[in-house]
Amino acid sequence: MKKKLLSFAFLFLTSFCFSQDHSKIIDSLKTVIFKKPSDSIKIKAYGDLCWYYRTESIDSAFKYGNLALKLSKETSNQVGEAQAYNDIGILHYNLADYKKALKYYDASLKIRSVLKDTMGIAALYSKIGLIHQNTFKLDSAIFYATKALKIYEEKNHTRYIAYIKSNIANIYRGLKQYQKALETHLEIADVNKSINDNLGLTRTYNNIANAYLFLKDTVQSEAYYLKSIDLALKYNYKKELAGLYNNYGGILHDMKKYLEAIDYNTKSLKLREELKDSYGITSTSLHLAGLYLDLGDFNKARNYLYEGLNLSKSFNINELKMDAYDKLASYYAFKRIPDSVLYYRQLFKSINDTIYNSRITKEIAEVQEKYNSAEREKEIQTQRAEIAEKELKLNRKNTQIIGLVTLALLLFLLGYLLYNQQKLRNKQLQKESELRQALVEIETHNKLQEQRLRISRDLHDNIGAQLTFIISSIENLQYGFKITNNKLKGKLTDISAFTKETINELRDTIWAMNKNEITLEDLQARISNFIDKANISASNSNFRFNMDEALSKELVFTSVRGMNIYRIIQEAVNNAIKYADASNIEIHIKKKYEAVVFTISDNGIGFDINEIEAGNGLSNMKKRANDMDATIIYKSQIRKGTKIILSV
Amino acid sequence: MDFNIFLETSISIAIAACISCMIKICTVTLNMKSKLDSDYFILKNKLILAKKENSILVNKVVLCNEINSKLLQSFFEVVKQLLSLQKFIFEKGQ
């Protein structure tokens, strides 16, 4: 809260500081600092103290300027730091120490460039331009003034535009383009009036007066000097007033109004002493010395001459030193002391040579520097070009290497694809060849089997035909002749029955052979057929044949398997008829889990499974079951019948 | 002609040729694979059918062999019985 109040107080103070006396402002600023405000306010207060002390005490101004700089650096306050460099630069400028002033301005410019403080940058350009103007580097002066003007024009800042234009007009004056300088100053005067810039107008009138003076129009010059003096007196512009008195004194001197000139120059000296304007004091002292020389008051002239010489020596202002030596030579000429005249003439000449030489050296150095810079620039450009060329070559080489690597990779990939294609082709062809070979082998085997079957069929046909012929012949014998011999009759009947049985077996096999596969339905029909025949031959026995409806009639067996099942059933039924003396024979087909179960049961005499010798019938059934990986179980008890279970 | 330009042009052409070759090879490989697969499939089907046929034929041959042995045996038995009958008739006739 306290800090806020302080800030407000400070702002209030700075707002009205222009209208107050410098010593009062300085006291108020010190009070602000005494109340220990925030660092930023302190920096601002130090800066302002530096500014207001500028005309009061240059040492104090330096002290507060350096304090502002130190605190800004400590608190990393870049705005404050730039302002402090700027303020200290101004102090050095006032002391005509242009080298140091430039150094501080540069430091400030760097920071303001980083901060992008365009107005601050423009102000610095303007000040740097002034330094160059004072050191007669008019090209640099116009360069910086133009830069500042550009910024102010962008910001449309009329007051500063007028100020910079005034500087530029002064440069024209330095280039002896007095008319142009005059016209510009007259334009600026109108601008100053339009914006009520009294300080600017005071300076502009002074400049107009100077321009008229150079154009040898002393009347106009005097008029403008007086106008300017009136304004400076009215608004208490001490610095400007000191300069004006000095300049106006110069005109009066030229007009040989020595006493009036001395009066104005004395006023100027007093003011300059008050302002501690070293350059001005020296210049005015030498001016007064000249006036007193012309008046013939040699003592006063001598005093002012030595005062001016000492000051010019202490501040090392060569131009003023030269003026002092020139006037001293005149003084000693009036005094008729030729050695001293010669001495001061030599000193004058020496400094004149030094200045001339230093200017020439400087110019040579500048030219050399420019040449070196150009050379360096050229060399840098050449090196840059070389580097760029090398980079280009390198890039090109890299591109070529990448291209070659890509090509190599692509070729490798291409090779791999070709290899892969061939490998795939070979693999497929090999597989195909294996398949073809297997197919050829199977087809050959099939042809062989077909050949065998054909031969077998021929054999069956032949034997079947012969057996049929035998049966037919025997039956013809039996019916054609009345055979009375029972033994013969029996033999004929046995042969006929055996042959018929053989033919039946053959037919059964041919039935199976004619089918690629045997369905359960086929098997059922065949078994029914067999039972019908058995029923005829064994009329005492009852046959029952049934099949579970759950069984699919589409169930398929291979011909061998079907034939084996049929033979087992046939064998079992034959055994029941022939040996068991059974009155009931049952054939049942059902499904049990995944298997098909054929059960042939009878109520015959049965047998003891442990005692009976397995004849051809039982062992045949067993063999057939084994051949087709089926299980066959015999269940029989004496006088309780027999049950044969075949699981397929 | 600048060697670099010649080299770069050659590389570019070679890369383009390689890429087009690769595309061609891939296309040919795919076509070949589908054709070979189709041939293989046809052959395999033929083989399956042949095997099936073979299995049927084997079954038939098994049945044939079984009946042949029995049939010949029975045939010779009939012949034997007929010879026995012939002998009986001849003895009775004398």
Image (spheres, grey):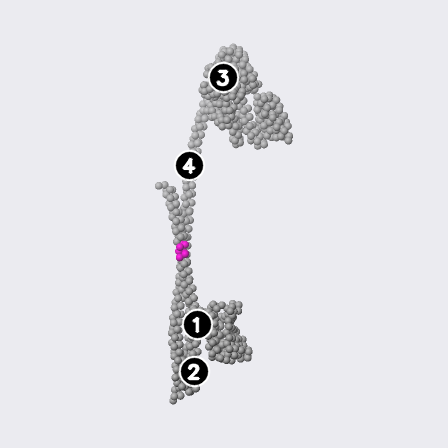
Kindly identify which residue carries mark 2. A493
Q: Quadrant of residue A9?
A: top right
Real-space CA distance between mark 3 and mark 4, rounded to the nearest whole angstrom: 59 Å
Callout 4 secondary element: helix
Q: Which mark is residue A386?
A: 4
Real-space CA distance between mark 1 and mark 2, rounded to the nearest whole angstrom: 28 Å
**Chain letter behind tag 3:** A
Of labels 2 and 3, earlier in sequence is 3
Of labels 1 and 2, earlier in sequence is 2
User: Depth-wise, is mark 4 or mark 2 nearer the camera?
Assistant: 2
Disc 4 crowd, CA 10 A, few/some/many (<14, 14-19, 20+):
few
User: Depth-wise, is mark 3 or mark 4 nearer the camera?
Assistant: 3
Real-space CA distance between mark 4 and mark 2, rounded to the nearest whole angstrom: 129 Å
Q: Which residues are magenta?
A: B29-35
Q: Is residue B77 left or right of residue A157?
A: left
Of labels 1 and 3, earlier in sequence is 3
Q: Position of residue A128 (x, y in %)?
A: 50, 25
Magenta stretch: helix, strand or loop mostly: helix
Q: Which mark is residue A209?
A: 3
Real-space CA distance between mark 4 and mark 1, rounded to the nearest whole angstrom: 101 Å
